[in-house]
Amino acid sequence: MNTLAMPSEGARMETGASFWKSGNRATLFAAFLYFDVSFMVWVMLGPLAPIISKDLGLDPAQKGLMVAIPTLAGAVLRLVNGLSVDRLGPKLVGAINQLIVIAGLAAAWHFGISTYEGTLAVGVLLGFAGASFAVALPLASRWYPPEHQGKAMGIAGMGNSGTVLASLFAPLLAKMFGWNNVFGLALIPLVAVFIYYMIAAKDSPDQPAPKSLSAYAEVLKEKDAWWFMLFYFVTFGGFVGLSNSLPTYYADSYGLTPVVAGYCTAAAVFAGSLLRPIGGAFADRFGGIKTLTVVYLLAALVLVGIALSAASLPLTFCLFLLVMGTLGIGNGAVFQLVPQRFRKEIGVMTGLVGFGGGVGGFYLASSLGFAKKLTGSATPGFLIFASLAVVALLGLTMVKTRWRTTWGAAVQGVRI
């Protein structure tokens, strides 16, 4: 049987059916691939940072800002994509974003980047790749019923494994061909996925009718929207912030070569990416609130451990594996909850919550660089982010009873 067979254009999700029979597998796979290669280029400057900073003579704060700019740009553009998805449909918005990234990287490769300001400009361009989050997740989510949202969003969201590809191959390719040529080589998978995406991806027939722009502002009047932004600020912000920062951290703190630092980073990123769909499945099985409670408690403890274990590379490596896996589970759990609370506004909510996560990643990556420059150590940055995980845990404790007795009680057959 063809595992990518899709329902007819007018087919709708089947509530009560098994996961693989309830939605559109070809669209789910297209969403994953689009997200995967987009994440690969979104975080590309992180693995290349040790090489670029050496060539351009950058200080720690400049390195931190360089790897953080794509995250901030992606956060802002996720808001734009979230609005656009509900009005134009996810497939069209995704196609436009992919063309912008392909054209921009082709220009960067053709003309070359030779200044710090040039890397910042490329970082802004790469934000369009990071904004894929607000397209790929609604594209997949709208094909699946409530009881399978955690798994569907987890599989589509596992596209953040593209950060593994960047960590593994960007430093190696830069060593072989020069870091400017990595921008050109990235076009190969981008173009291949774009072609498949245009053939396989389909908008769900359950797409809500377009709303006025003022209607989207109504979502921000909901307290729960802000809570979800905070929760994702910590889980996804921690994941992408560390993905961008670890190559430089390993190179500066332990003297590892860019290639070896990339391998160490790839291992941690792989753990976080692999466990994202598992986090969604845990949330489907045990409830998103219980899953996130464990995530925030463990993440805070491990981040403190990282801050205190800087002298030991083996211990630090293991702790980064643990914290990235934990944050990956948290990413899946957050997006098991969001579609239950805001199903009709999933496009704009994906943009808003993704914006919160992107800002968290920008904060962590830039703060680690500034902490290193001001104190000679990244320890304060890790401790502050650990405290933010505690804040998220306290916030979750405050809202969980209300969630379970209001909108959570109205969703049949789903654990909240």
Image (cartoon, rainbow, N blue to C red):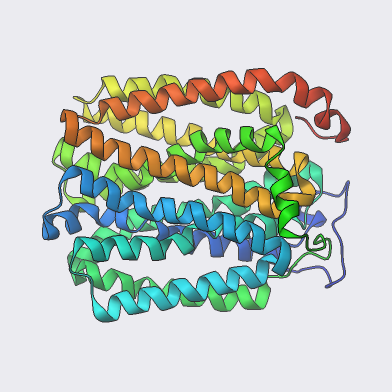
To which quarter of the image does residue 370 belong?
Answer: top left
198 is higher (above) or lower (below) than 271? below
Percent position of residue 354, x then y = 56, 48
* Image-based side of 15 in relation to 210, left or right: right
The quadrant the C terminus occupies is top right
Q: How many marks?
A: 0
- Rendered residue at 60%/61% (across/down): 81
> Which part of the image, by quadrant, shows the N terminus?
bottom right
Is residue 356 shown above or below 10?
A: above
Depth check, front residue: 361 or 330: 361
The residue that appears at 34% across and 59% down in the rendered structure is 44
Report x, y in % for residue 77. Answer: 52, 58
Query: 390 or 303: nearer the eye?
Result: 390
Q: Is residue 252 left or right of residue 97?
A: left
Residue at image x 63%, y 23%?
Answer: 396
Q: Is residue 131 above or below residue 65?
A: below
Q: Position of residue 141 (x, y in %)?
A: 72, 53
